[in-house]
């Protein structure tokens, strides 16, 4: 039996910050120019959400499902799990998220983008953070551009933009789509915190904002 | 003047003379102090190479090559023991890559661990570790942090009896489970124990190190620099005058000399990603080592900083 209470969060960090950020450099080099495709998919998501047409909901779910499956396999499973064995247990959750998106997006009335409340607008803000802000972060934190985290390639901007889309959505089963990206952002934020990386606040703030909006929406009902 | 590891190594490399200790021919690399494994009498250099975090670089080809360079510098400096664990992410295949690149150095003393709560999975995990390292057998296999220790020790002693490993050990770190550790040390014919010990973490001096001497068990010291925290903390402090008396040019060498000068310690295993640091670490086990009085002076000095 391990005495878990004797361990600090730092004891679970198996790699150095340099190795962590080099992962993004290598992923970007391996997949370029797929980035253009994933960013175009992100812009398409924004347009589909803004048009609020019911028949587009399935397309939103399909695009997000494809990106979760791709990031789960290409980044988490194939790259991150190599330096962090715990991620081997997390990567399948991205696959599960893809299946949930397909199931809920394909169901009658599963996803609808008819919200015109503050939550919907905050959702668009989160999508902008995932699509636009994240790729611009490296120079702000003293890293090279090639280590940029890009929507659809890296997990954090993908999860944040997905939460933005979900905040703009309504549907009885939509709450089932929040836990996986939220838990991922919590894990990622804590990892960055333990690494001493000042960027740690960003995934935690995105997750916290989403939880606060969901709580306020519940109170308002 | 404040001397950092970097400035020391640069100055030493520039002058050449700084690398030469009394009794060493000019230009020759001084040999590290050797320590005997009590159960066999085999001699090992007192500084080894740890791989926790530093060798977990995944499939990154640039970083893998850097690790191979660290291994090469380690052997060139006279080092032998490399320690790893299945828990250390990709460290095992990265060691294997480095050893392959270096043509499988004969000097290698391979120290591995078994780390699974399932007794049945232990042999398969050790076999997998063999494949990662690319070695036919390990010199030492230790039960990592006492996880599943009863069943694993049974397996390891059987492997030793069959000649599939040479030594058996157990590990702990950062002072965890010392009571149980002591019980296992008393009850089983261990060849090695691995524990945390350094100039500020001295709990092991009370019971475990004396018990190791009494029972004839070799001691591997992990986390000598508190995962770098100790050297970072001391980096801004000027080296005291007595550092020169023990041949230490940096705080890292002060810390390592303190550790390996304990009579019960066999090998300290600092981890690093840098070639200059690995040379400096092995050099810490050369030349003068502090006596008991000096050790107390060193510990008091660091405690009062």
Image (cartoon, rainbow, N blue to C red):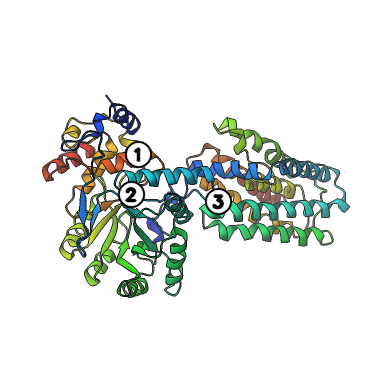
Instruction: For mark 3, give the secondary structure.
Output: helix
- Foreground of the two, A107 or B254: B254
Q: Residue B36 location in percent, x, y?
A: 20, 57
Instruction: For mark 2, give the secondary structure.
Output: loop
The residue carrying pointer 2 sits among few (fewer than 14), some (14 to 19) or many (20 or more) residues within 10 Å by Cα, namely many
Q: Residue B296 location in percent, x, y?
A: 15, 43
At 32% from the left and 32% from the top, the residue drawn is: B9
The residue carrying pointer 3 sits among few (fewer than 14), some (14 to 19) or many (20 or more) residues within 10 Å by Cα, namely some
Q: Which residue is mark 3?
A: A187
Per the model, the C-alpha gap separating discs 1 and 2 is 15 Å
> Between tags 1 and 2, which lies in front?
1
At 82% from the left and 62% from the top, the residue drawn is: A107
> Between tags 1 and 3, which lies in front?
1
**Do tags 2 and 3 sit on the same chain?**
no
The residue carrying pointer 1 sits among few (fewer than 14), some (14 to 19) or many (20 or more) residues within 10 Å by Cα, namely many
Residue B283 versus residue A14 in the image, above or below: above
> Between tags 2 and 3, which lies in front?
2
Per the model, the C-alpha gap separating discs 2 and 3 is 26 Å
Chain of the residue that carries numbered disc 2 in the rendered image: B
Res A170 seen here? no
Residue A23 appears left or right of B55: right
- Foreground of the two, B45 or B113: B45
Q: Which residue is mark 2?
A: B223
Cβ–Cβ below 8 Å for labels 2 and 3?
Answer: no
Q: Which residue is mark 1?
A: B277
**Do tags 1 and 2 sit on the same chain?**
yes
Q: Residue B233 location in percent, x, y?
A: 33, 36
At 37% from the left and 53% from the top, the residue drawn is: B105
Per the model, the C-alpha gap separating discs 1 and 3 is 33 Å
């Amino acid at each position: 039996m391990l005495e878990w209470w004797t361990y600090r969060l730092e004891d679970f960090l198996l790699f150095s910050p340099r190795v962590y950020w080099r992962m993004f450099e290598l992923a970007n080099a391996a997949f370029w120019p797929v980035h253009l495709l994933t960013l175009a998919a992100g812009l398409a998501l924004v347009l589909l959400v803004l048009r609020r047409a019911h028949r587009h909901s399935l397309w939103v779910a399909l695009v997000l499902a494809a990106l979760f499956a791709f990031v789960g396999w290409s980044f988490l499973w194939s790259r991150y799990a190599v330096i962090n064995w715990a991620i081997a247990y997390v990567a399948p959750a991205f696959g599960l998220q893809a299946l949930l998106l397909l199931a809920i997006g394909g169901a009658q009335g599963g996803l609808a983008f008819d919200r015109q409340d503050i939550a919907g607008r905050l959702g668009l803000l989160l999508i902008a953070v995932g699509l636009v802000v994240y790729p611009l972060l490296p120079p702000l934190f003293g890293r090279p551009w090639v280590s940029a985290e890009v929507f659809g390639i890296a997990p954090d901007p993908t999860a944040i933009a997905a939460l933005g889309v979900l905040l703009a959505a309504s549907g009885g089963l939509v709450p089932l789509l929040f836990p996986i990206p939220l838990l991922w952002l919590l894990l990622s934020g804590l990892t960055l915190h333990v690494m001493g990386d000042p960027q740690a606040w960003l995934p935690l703030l995105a997750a916290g904002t989403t939880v606060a909006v969901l709580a306020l929406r519940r109170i308002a009902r | 003047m404040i001397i950092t590891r970097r400035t020391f190594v640069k100055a030493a490399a520039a002058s050449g003379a700084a690398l030469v200790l009394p009794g060493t021919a000019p230009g020759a690399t001084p040999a590290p102090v050797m320590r005997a494994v009590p159960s066999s009498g085999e001699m090992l250099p007192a500084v080894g190479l740890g791989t926790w975090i530093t060798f977990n670089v995944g499939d990154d080809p640039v970083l893998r090559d850097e690790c191979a360079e660290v291994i090469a510098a380690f052997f060139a400096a006279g080092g032998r023991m490399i320690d790893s664990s299945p828990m250390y992410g990709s460290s095992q295949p990265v060691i294997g890559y480095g050893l392959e690149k270096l043509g499988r150095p004969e000097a290698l003393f391979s120290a591995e661990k078994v780390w699974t709560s399932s007794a049945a999975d232990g042999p398969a995990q050790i076999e997998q570790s063999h494949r990662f390292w690319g070695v036919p057998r390990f010199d030492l296999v230790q039960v990592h942090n006492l996880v599943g220790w009863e069943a694993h020790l049974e397996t390891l002693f059987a492997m030793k009896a069959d000649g599939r490993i040479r030594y058996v050990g157990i590990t702990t770190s950062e002072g965890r489970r010392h009571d149980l550790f002591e019980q296992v040390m008393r009850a089983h014919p261990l060849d090695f124990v691995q524990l945390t010990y350094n100039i500020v973490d001295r709990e092991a001096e009370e019971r475990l190190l004396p018990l190791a001497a009494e029972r004839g068990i070799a001691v591997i010291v992990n986390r000598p620099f508190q995962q770098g925290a100790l050297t970072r903390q001391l980096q801004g402090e000027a080296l005291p005058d007595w550092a020169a008396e023990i041949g230490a040019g940096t705080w890292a060498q002060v810390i390592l000399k303190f550790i390996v000068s304990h009579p019960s310690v066999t090998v300290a295993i600092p981890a690093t990603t840098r070639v200059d640091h690995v040379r400096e670490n092995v050099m810490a086990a050369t030349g003068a080592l502090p006596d008991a009085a000096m050790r107390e002076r060193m510990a008091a000095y660091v405690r009062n900083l």
